[in-house]
Amino acid sequence: MERTFEQNLDAYAHLIINTGCNVQPGQELFISSDIANAQLVRLLVAEGYRVGASNVTVHWTDEQVSRMHYDNRPLEAWSQFPEWQAELQNGVARRGAALLFIDSEDPYGMTGVDPRKFAARTKAAHEACKEWRRGMDFGLNVWCIVGAASPAWASRVFPDLPVEEAVGKLWDAIFATVRVNTPDPDAAWMAREKDFKRHVDWLNGLGLDRLHYTNGIGTELTVGLNADGLWEAGGGYTKGGTFFFPNMPTEEVFSTPDRERVDGIVYSALPLNHDGTLIDRFWVRFEGGRAVECGAEQGQEALQSIIDTDEGSHYLGECSLVPKESPIHQSGILFLSTLFDENAACHLALGMGFPECLKGGLDMSKDELLAAHVNQSATHVDFMVGTDDLTVTGFARDGREVPIFVDGTWAE
């Protein structure tokens, strides 16, 4: 029997709290969401308390008000992060809260804003919210990002439809990509986790030194890998042993590259929506790991601002493999949201690397990770590079050449 929208939304809330966040009895839950998502948030709060959360804090935002702030506050104001917000975020992280973020932004909602303001805010937040960032980066806190179909976002994805119809169609797409439309969504996610493990085990057993990317749109890039590097996918564990899924949906198998061994040029396969500004048809060239040149037909200033956020944002922190059989790719929908579009195509990320992708990395300091060539930065921005003709060739440390991807999918 087909579920109603309300039944699907209930199932989605159950999935997010129980499998995405895996909220434990007595644990706090922190939810950050735009006011457009109130219906979902209420269900999440109720489910959080049903499973035994000790307290649920909701941090409401309003995209239209945020735009007013960016339009009216000068650039220098963005170098100061609000003390009350830093204390809120650091406090819930310190107490071991599960951190849940709902993505529903208008892909064009911040078009025209000076991108230096976003970069300044990112740096200020990184400095002021160290416990918050450490909690997510070093496995101390559960965290999860999910999507919700706001009218503004839905109208961008389906511009030819009336708003109400567009919202319904986007919700249907979200439910499909997170497997809510299956008989048992929680079980479906755990079954998918087993599929991820097969590819992770294969890649970790190859002893790869580097990857070489090529395709028909001009990408010719070599990405070096750390000798003690690890591939990860799907869910992960906190240092306390709680299993959770950081992203819903997720279709990627990922690692952290050697920040100093990336050379060549890479072209974008899909547009990048960053802080409400669209960057499209762009490329980045690397030498010795560092991004030394870039170009974009749309959003050039925003792209350069991402790269110039800090020194670490000039380097890669992630390389992820996503086959073209991904249900998000197969849907044919351009979501204009990195949460979804990064799971439609192989991607790279400028900025912060993942400590869990290095043996012993979660027990290292940031300086130790940097010395081990795991990138450090205040930002982490994914961009999609996978095409249907993408070839990724692995070169093992023992000299073997191993096909990893052929024509946009797994070679194994």
Image (tube, grey):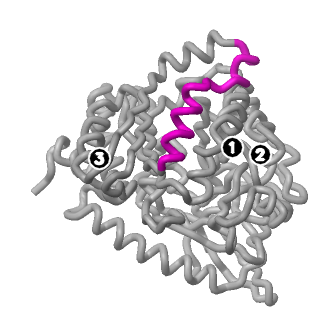
Q: How many marks?
A: 3
Q: Is residue 163 above or below residue 283?
A: above
Image location of residue 298, percent across then percent down: 69, 32
Given residues 254 and 56, the one toward you in this image is 56
Circle 3 residue? 48
Task: Report if the CB atoms under discs 2 and 1 are less than 8 Å apart.
Answer: yes
Q: Is residue 264 above or below residue 134?
A: below
Q: Bounds of the magenta span?
A: 74-95
Q: Would residue 87 be found to the left or right of residue 59 on screen?
A: right
Image location of residue 96, percent across then percent down: 47, 51
Tell me the CA gap for discs 3 and 1: 29 Å
Mark sitting earlier along the chain (3/2): 3
Identify the residue at horizontal 49%, vertical 65% (top origin).
240
Mark sitting earlier along the chain (2/1): 2
Mark sitting earlier along the chain (3/1): 3
Tell me the CA gap for discs 3 and 2: 36 Å
Q: What's the residue type where badge 3 is placed?
A: Gly
Is residue 233 something one can see in this rendering?
Answer: yes
Circle 2 residue? 313
Task: Report if the CB atoms under discs 3 and 1 are less than 8 Å apart.
Answer: no
Tell me the CA gap for discs 2 and 1: 7 Å
> Predominant secondary structure in magenta?
helix
Q: Would residue 253 be found to the left or right of residue 247 on screen?
A: right
User: Which quadrant holds the N terminus?
Assistant: bottom left
